[in-house]
Image (cartoon, grey):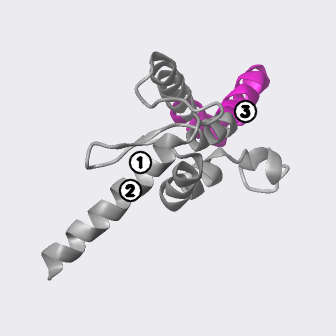
Amino acid sequence: ENLFLEFAKQLVAEKDLLRSRRKRPAFCLMHHNLLYRLLWDLLLLVLLIYVLITRPLALGFGEMEALTYIDLFTDTVFFVDIAVNFRTTIPLPNGIVLTDGLKIAQEYVRTWFLLDLVSSIPWDLVTDGRLPGMQ
């Protein structure tokens, strides 16, 4: 019985996927394996390393005026990444690539969206220096 239920769920999932493939291609959808996506992820990695190095230094020694524009750029890129993630295909464990925009958005909101949103907020600007060490 359990095996039959799993098989039925798989059939329904594949039917939904085939139905979504018959629709015209989604607007501005980026495939997860494209070179552009790899370069975007590499940029995010570099910016994340920058934040990991500069944020503790800024909290300990105060903000450096020279890094203000780089910090603003970094915050902007992290927010843009949220939009990019809403439009990037998702590989599923069964080997199928999720290309339906609504299903991609649902999966992203269910998994990484909250973490991305909270970590992308420039808390030093939001709190306007009210938190210790964030003047």
Measuring 52% from the left and 35% from the top, which residue is drawn there? 52
Name the residue carrying label 3.
76
The earlier-in-sequence mark between 2 and 3 is 2
* Structural distance between the alpha carbons of marks 1 and 2: 5 Å
**Does residue 134 appear in this view?**
no
Label 2 sits on residue: 15
Examine the rendered structure and indicate whether residue 37 appears above or below residue 60. Answer: above
Observer able to see residue 50: yes
Disc 2 is placed on an element classified as helix
Q: Contact, CB < 8 Å: mark 1 with mark 2?
A: yes
The answer for how far apart the CA atoms under marks 3 and 1 are is 36 Å
Q: Residue furthest right?
A: 128
Which of the labelled discs sits on residue 18, or is there none?
Answer: 1
Where in the figure is residue 48, as x and y percent of width and height?
Answer: 52, 32
Kind of residue indicated by mark 2: Lys
State how far apart marks 2 and 3 are (Cα). 39 Å
The residue nearer to you, when weighing 71 against 109, is 109
Q: Position of residue 63 (x, y in %)?
A: 73, 33
Q: Secondary structure at mark 1?
A: helix
